Amino acid sequence: MDPSFALYLVRPIGRRYRPAPPPDAPLVLEARALARREEPWSGKERTERFNNLREQFVLNQEYALARDAETLEAPASWPTAITELAVQALLTALAQRSGTRNATAVAVSLAGTRAGLRRAARRRAARRLGLTLDNAPRPVHPAFTTFLAMLALKAFPRFRAGWFPVIPLWPFWLAVGIVRELEERRSWRQAWRTSTARPASSDSTAASDTAAAA
C-alpha cells in the first residue's frame, strides 16, 4: 500500500476539539461585544485588529458563534453516523466499479448534499444536548504542518516515478471513516467534560446569545 494511504489510518485527519474558553476570557468578551453590535464586524476592522494568527482564529470563531449560536455542533448520533458511513461505502464501491471519471463526478455531485445533511444532524445533536456558548467544545483545525506532511507523502511518489498509486477499495475508506469517527468522539468527550465542569455564566444559553446578537 502506498505510504500516503497508510497515514490515514495511523493519523487520520479528523476533527479535534478544545474545551470552551472561560466566559470571562478577554477574547471571548471582545467577541461577544462585537457580536452585540447592529452592524457586522467588517473585514477592515478584522485586519486592523489582527495581532497573531492563533488569536485571530479564536476571535473569529467566538464572534461567529456569538452572532448565531444555532451553529453550535456536536457529533451526530451513532445511528446517523453509521448510516452515513454505510452510504459512503456503498457510493464509493459503485463509483470505483464504474471508473475514475464517474467516481469523481459522483463524489463532486453528492459532496454538497452529504455535507448539508451531516451539518443538520450535528446541530440537532447540539440542541438535544443543550449546548451553550459557555460549554460547547470548540473545533480545532488540523495543524498546517500535518497537512503539509500528508500532501508531501501523497505527491512524492508521483513526482519521483510519474505514476499514480492504486486507489484503495471501499473497505479501506470505511475503516478510515470508523477510525475518524471514534477519534472525533473521544476528543469531543474530553473537551465536553472539561467545559461542563466550569460554572456557566448567566447569558450562556443559545437563545439569549442569539437574541443579544440580533
Image (spheres, rainbow, N blue to C red):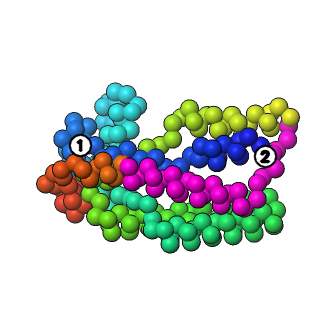
Q: Look at 60% across and 58% down and name the residue there.
A: 177
Q: Is residue 189 magenta?
A: yes
Q: Quadrant of residue 98?
A: bottom right
In the rendering, at what x and y percent does residue 129 appear? 32, 65
- Residue picked out by circle 1: 22
For this view, does 76 lie left or right of residue 211? right
Neighbour class for label 2 at 10 Å: few (<14), some, many (≥20)?
few
Is residue 106 in sight in this rendering? no
Left or right: 209 in relation to 92:
left
Q: Which mark is residue 1?
A: 2
Per the picture, the main secondary structure of the magenta-coloured stretch is: helix
Q: Position of residue 162 (x, y in %)?
A: 85, 37
Q: In the image, what residue type sits under mark 1?
A: Pro
The CA distance from mark 2 to mark 1 is: 45 Å
Which badge, 2 or 1, is on the more N-terminal residue? 2
Instruction: Check disc 1: other Cα within 10 Å, few if <14, some if 14-19, many if 20+.
Output: some
- Horizontally, residue 100 falls left or right of residue 63, namely right
Asked if the stretch drawn in magenta spans residue 85, the answer is: no
Q: Say which mark, if any, is on residue 118.
A: none
Q: Quadrant of the C terminus?
A: bottom left
Give the magenta part as a residue range. 162-190
Q: Is residue 94 visible?
A: yes
Q: Nearer the viewer, residue 35 or 189?
A: 189
